[in-house]
Amino acid sequence: MSIKIAVPKATAEHERRCAASPETVKKLVAAGCEVVIETAAGEGASFTDNMFKNAGAKIAATAKEACAVANVITCVRAPTADELGFIPKGALLIGMLAPYANAQLVGDMANAGINAFSMELIPRITRAQAMDVLSSQANLAGYKAVLDAAGHFTRAFPMMMTAAGTIPPARVFVMGVGVAGLQAIATAKRLGAIVSATDVRPATKEQVISLGGTFVAIEDEEFKQAETAGGYAKQMSPEYMAKQQKLVEEHIAKQDIVITTALIPGRPAPKLVTAKMVESMKPGSVIVDLAVETGGNCELSEPGKAVKKHGVTLVGHANMPSRLATDASALYSKNILNLLNLLIKDKTLSINWDDEIVKGVALTRDGTVVHPLFAKKEAAA
């Protein structure tokens, strides 16, 4: 059976990305797939229908038409209830399905007989790195966060020596040294800022210093043991947290720009910047909250808005990767292509359900919720 891949247009608010690019379409067609793309699906990412046609895709007038005969559907965000109705029974749906926030959808997909793969659940193993959407999208988010901060900041980033006087460099503090945080550090340094960063994982200190930043943390014995064997942060004691918060409070008061990047899958974002910390900052300072959609790292940030409070601009743009839609789509569609290359054998869809990567991403199969994390929730419900 030939593989028919449908790519519907993303309809979520603030979403401009596309789950295919002309480059990935060309490769899928060369691999023997038939690709059907909903008209204007790539518009927000500057991919025209003609670009997709020239790459070998067919263009459908509606999402329903695109999905009608597809056995694989690739999307950006989780489908709505109406969009779920367009997907044929037995088809494979691949996208960032946000299962932690869409418990009802997981059950609905199982009931509809849809085999669903959630890209955020790609395991963090070497052979899956090229499929890791969290990394590819967070990298762009960290870069864009610094540019947004620069756009709202009323001063320059680098030190400038002029005949009229010297402009001091901006001070940028990055909270959370994951993929987004590391890119934010690198970008702020390239713009000439004095950069510092904090994280509860000891291993990140070396990464911060390697990028030219200063590491900020209470480095006691508890801190040295704060990382699990798997590289995740351990829960710290209340005593340590109090000492760390005091240090951060003192540090933030001297900063011009703060960028927060801390996210915990399936849980609200941890509060890192209190109202008191915001008040302590100089007028004209900027805070960019990359976790604003899951509750925010800053107590005062507002989703989808840039607001000024206590003289500080709080930037809470929703869906930061989508603000760089062309590159975000190009990387995301490559992540999907790399996963499909694992699933396609001899021009047919051949899923090895025992593969470690497949086990990691598979939410539903043949009418059942199969992912261990969500099967338990479904059973409890």
Image (cartoon, grey):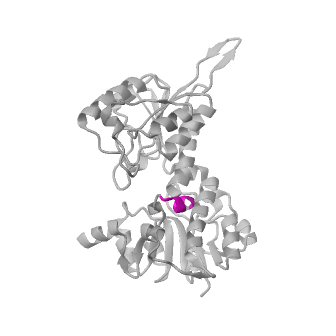
Q: Is residue 94 above or below residue 136?
A: below
Q: Is residue 29 above or below residue 47?
A: below
Task: Tell me if 299 is positioned left or right of 165 in this view.
Answer: left
Image location of residue 109, percent across then percent down? 40, 75
Q: 114 or 345: nearer the eye?
A: 345
Q: Is residue 30 visible?
A: yes
Query: Which residue is depicted at the point 38% across and 29% down?
Result: 248
Say which quarter of the image contains residue 253. Answer: top left
Task: Tell me if 185 is positioned left or right of 274 in this view.
Answer: right
Image location of residue 180, percent across then percent down? 51, 45
Query: Which residue is depicted at the point 62% across and 66% down?
Result: 20
Image location of residue 267, percent across then percent down? 33, 52
Query: Which residue is depicted at the point 58% across and 65% down?
Result: 19
Quadrant of the frame with the C terminus: bottom left
Q: Is residue 150 above or below residue 345?
A: above
Q: Is residue 320 above or below residue 133?
A: above
Query: Which residue is depicted at the point 42% across and 50% down?
Result: 293
Q: Which residues are magenta?
A: 125-130
Question: Is residue 193 within the magenta segment?
Answer: no
Q: How many marks?
A: 0
Q: Main secondary structure of the magenta part?
A: helix
